[in-house]
Each structure stands twice: as C-alpha cells, then as structure tokens.
Amino acid sequence: MTEAIVGPVPPGVGAIVVGMTFDRWRTHARLRAALSLLAEGRPVSRVAHTVGYATPSAFLAAFRRTVGTTPGRYLGGGTSLMSDPDRTQL
C-alpha cells in the first residue's frame, strides 16, 4: 500500500539519497503522506491503513517515536517538536 503513496524505491536508495536507512526513510515518507490526510480531517484509523500501517496503534507509535508528539498535537500546534536529534520535522 505504501508504494501507491510514495512509489517503489529499491532497498538502499533512501540511504544514498537522504542520508538515512531505508526503513527510516520509509517511515518519514509514510508520515509525510499521513499529515496531509490528517489535515483534511480523515480519521486516524483510515489514514494509518492508507499509508501502510497494519493498525492505528502502530501508526501512532511510529508518529510519536519520530515526531515526539501525537498527530493531533502536531497539527494543532499544541506542542513543539522535541530537541532530540532522532526526532525530526517531517
């Protein structure tokens, strides 16, 4: 399902292009795609499946781990991104 959103990418290309592992690049691509869908008001459960997560809880865990807050707080401006270098803006 992710390929429909971000297109197929051969393993290793993400690391060459953007300086990160393929898995990390894929997570960022999924979350970037999810942000626009969430901003349109689509439910988290539907967005999670659309961007390739098996469950909404897996999506929320990846979002919190990557961004440092929930999608609602991120989109609502309720909190700023954490300064942890492993957590980046999408």
Image (cartoon, rainbow, N blue to C red):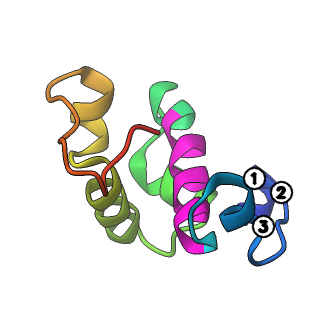
Q: Nearer the viewer, residue 74 or 10?
A: 10
Q: Which residue is mark 1?
A: 6
How far apart, in angstroms, are the residues tagged by discs 1 and 2?
4 Å
Q: Which residue is mark 3?
A: 13
Instruction: Identify which residue is drawn at 20% across, 50% down.
Output: 84
How far apart, in angstroms, are the residues tagged by discs 3 and 1?
13 Å
Secondary structure, mark 2, is: loop
Secondary structure, mark 3, is: helix
Crowdedness near tag 1: few (<14), some (14–19) or many (≥20) residues, C-alpha within 10 Å? some
Instruction: Identify which residue is drawn at 18% across, 29% down.
Output: 80
How far apart, in angstroms, are the residues tagged by discs 2 and 3?
12 Å
Residue 20 position by quadrant: bottom right
Q: Nearer the viewer, residue 67 or 1?
A: 67
- Magenta segment main secondary structure: helix
Q: Which residue is mark 2?
A: 7
Quadrant of image for the N terminus: bottom right
- Mark 2 against mark 3, which lies toward the viewer? 3
> Is 83 rendered above or below residue 55?
above
Span highlighted in magenta in the image = 23-35
